[in-house]
Image (cartoon, grey):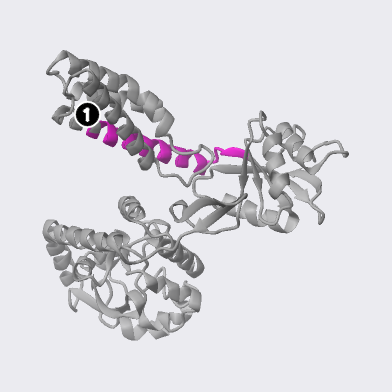
Amino acid sequence: MAVGDVLTATVAAAAVWPFPSRPHLLAVCALAVSWPLVAAALARRGDRFLSATRPGTGVVQALTVLVAAVAIAGSLAGAQLLGGWLVAAAAILLCGSLLVRFLVARRVRTLRRRGVPGARTIVVGTSSALSGVIDRLAGDDDQVLTVVGACVEGADGVVVDTFPVGGPIAADGATLALPSARSPVDTVRAAAVESGAQVVCVAPGSGFTGERLRELGWALEGTGAVLTAELGLADVAAHRTRVGQAGASTLLQVCEVRFAGARWVAKSVVDRTLAAVGLALLFPLFAAVALAVRASGPGPVLYRQVRVGREGLLFTMLKFRTMHTDADRRRDELLASADGAGPMFKMRDDPRITRVGRVLRKYSLDELPQLVNVLRGEMSLVGPRPPLPEEVAEYTTVERRRLRAIPGMTGLWQVSGRSNLTWDETVRLDLRYVDNWSLGEDARLLGRTAGAVLKGTGAY
């Protein structure tokens, strides 16, 4: 990341050459030299042990500080440094540094998925809570924290055992040989030191609260281990949380996601604008696909199906036809052979799909006419999968929460496996999107969709 910031600063300086005056030359040199240092201080990817970070915010903050410093220094020196050259240099620094962080984050995710461990972590808590924490940390896509050991608490909060998890925590892989006459704080500290832990994570319901938790933080000073607390909150994005204080207590607030207001209007405007542009640019592709569908057999080019939209409103969703014309009539006879659990019907080797239809489904080309639904406001570019009315009729109260958001052409389900997902996984991903919706998440999912479509994984 540091090397990338240096290269970005060099490109920004070269792009605004030649310089109008000596003060401009000095200002550009100051930008080029200062940017890697300011970025390292303010635009790092958040805490290196936590994945729930927003690097873009840090880059913007660092760039704002640097540009303000240059402008103030120029004003004090009697030189007018604000101008097009500074805007161009700042734009290059912004775009280049964001690209660097995106590439670094993607490389880190790739390494972690190949088995390269994250920060060595010890979890502390009761036996009933530890398994849940370990499972939740193991389910992290980035694998930022790798659990190597656990300190088990008894009913009275005393640490009664320490043992390795998923690999040797001590040299011989056995239970840590810790002196018995230790306080719980000293026991955890000794386990962290002996295992070389970088993170000590306290599980929900642990006896390490209040003064004892503060003492543990003191005890870990100088060991290289960071103290964290796992709150047991599942699928709550960082942007929904706020940390504050009431008296001596530290409080964590979980904010409500509102599908209204300026951000929701912005989502609608962006959706319809991009849909209109997409329809205009993709017209030749539409024509080619329509000809292929027409040649695949008798029947209409477009398939119209009633789906359930936001808050249960019905709409007609458009797709290129990928099945034979008797597909709906044959659905009931194929239910016994379906691959999916839950109310959603899916079948890997569906005999109703045409040869052209299989190609269209693999690369999601059959979904393109839904840009018309987006233009009408019935769908969004990003959102939960639009369900059928008969599926919604079987929904539980939890599953009906998926209908809070407007359905989308793509979403977490699209980039996470599509039809390879179980029903429970599909619901979990849709609820994660609904509960944590943001414009930034929409942009990220749109970027990931291109890769998922080209791979064709889980499309049938």
Q: Position of residue 440 (x, y in %)?
A: 34, 52
Is the magenta region chiefly helix, strand or loop?
Answer: helix
Crowd around label 1: few <14 · some 14–19 · many ≥20 (10 Å): many
Q: Which residues are magenta?
A: 91-120
**Residue 50 colored in magenta in the image:** no
Q: Quadrant of residue 329?
A: bottom left
Q: Going by the image, does 285 lie left or right of 416?
A: left
Q: Going by the image, does 20 lie left or right of 52?
A: left
Q: Is residue 5 visible?
A: yes
Residue drawn where x is 76% and y is 35% of the image: 190
Q: Quadrant of residue 201?
A: top right
Q: Amino acid at mark 1?
A: Ala
Q: Position of residue 282 (x, y in %)?
A: 15, 58
Q: Position of residue 366 (x, y in %)?
A: 25, 66
Q: Nearer the viewer, residue 181 or 61?
A: 61
Q: Going by the image, does 382 lie left or right of 180?
A: left
Work out whether 402 lies above or below 364: below
